[in-house]
Amino acid sequence: MKSTAEPEDLAVRFEENRVRLRAVAYRMLGSQSEADDAVQEAWLRLSRAGGAEVENVGGWLTTVVARVCLDVLRSRKLRREEPLDGDDALEASDGAEANAAEQELQLADSLGPALLIVLETLAPSERIAFVLHDLFAVSFDEIAAIVGKSPAAARQLASRARRRVQGTDAAPDAGRARQREIVAAFLAAARAGNFEALLSVLDPEVVLRSDATAIKMGAANDLRGAEAVARTASTNRQQGARLALIDGVVGAVWSPKGKPRVTFSFMITGEKITAIDLTADPARLAALDLVVLES
């Protein structure tokens, strides 16, 4: 039977893994502060466990960090707006730690900003599977336990994410960025009640549709034409909507008191919004992967 490790021993074993854990967490979350929080949580859990029955401390800590990151990705209500870059990946350090950090992040950093843009669009489980397997060589058996799926399903998650990453080039990235700009412009105009600005991003034949729950909440349905949609866009719910990723696609969500009540999905053709779909059904909302992009 294993005995509980001494606190000093645990601290040494944790420090041996800290750099790698921070690298893993940063690539999952895209935020150094959140990555540091995830690593700190792993240390707290290791301290509470006392090291008992932990055969592979590095693997155990990686699993804990991944699960913490998965929870953050699933419940995140705010994402940083400024672009991410490799310079923020780790704070300044010296000696062996700096060298180790550089080695751990070499592959991930070499993929550059395009990877970070694509990772932002992935569902949480896809992002976890891709980062752990493709960037840090964690087995699918281990990933399966973290995301709560079979090894085969975990492999499929990583495969879907990999296809999206491998298909990334300047044109798709620019397209995603432009879609985000268009939706953001629509939301800003709606908040300001700027009718002309709303018309500038709406296709003349735009249609707005709402599900049954949204209609019961007072939302309009089957509105057609830019003027009609622009008029209703200044209602309270749309004024309160925030830019978000909905299953990896740019959209918006109205979340009074932090609880998602209505999502806004946009179809964009060229430079114009051609359709807006409002979803408020609780069951459908619960099944969506929502990441709010602005406060």
Image (cartoon, rainbow, N blue to C red):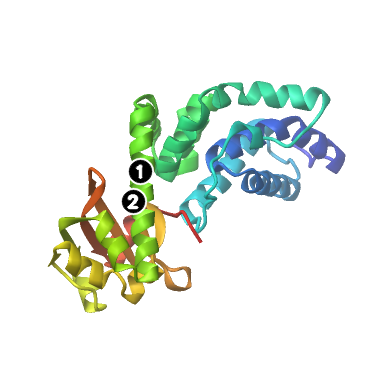
Check disc 2 and report the residue beneath it.
182
**Which image quadrant for residue 185?**
bottom left
Name the residue: 21% across, 66% down.
Answer: 229
The reply to whether residue 253 is in sight is: no
10 Å crowding of disc 1: few (<14), some (14-19), many (20+) = some
Q: Is residue 271 left or right of residue 4?
A: left
Q: In the image, residue 207 lies at what x, y percent?
A: 16, 60
Q: What amino acid does circle 2 point to?
A: Ile
The reply to whether residue 10 is in sight is: yes
Q: In the image, residue 138 lies at what x, y percent?
A: 53, 28
Check disc 1 and report the residue beneath it.
178
In the image, 195 versus 283, the foreground residue is: 195
Q: What amino acid does circle 1 point to?
A: Arg
Image vertical order of residue 276 relative to residue 48, above or below = below
10 Å crowding of disc 2: few (<14), some (14-19), many (20+) = many
Name the residue: 68% across, 36% down.
Answer: 54
In the image, 159 versus 67, the foreground residue is: 159
In the image, 110 versus 228, the foreground residue is: 228
Image vertical order of residue 259 relative to residue 132, above or below = below
Q: In the image, residue 127 lies at what x, y percent?
A: 45, 38
Q: Which mark is residue 292?
A: none
In the image, 81 versus 286, the foreground residue is: 81
Image vertical order of residue 74 relative to residue 108, above or below = below
Mark 2 near mark 1, Cβ–Cβ under 8 Å? yes
Element under label 2?
Answer: helix
Name the residue: 38% across, 28% down.
Answer: 170
| Numbered circles on residues, count | 2
Q: Is residue 94 left or right of residue 219?
A: right
Name the residue: 79% across, 32% down.
Answer: 93
Q: In the image, residue 199 lies at what x, y percent?
A: 25, 61
- Looking at this rendering, what residue extends furthest in the front direction? 196
Q: Quadrant of the N terminus?
A: top right
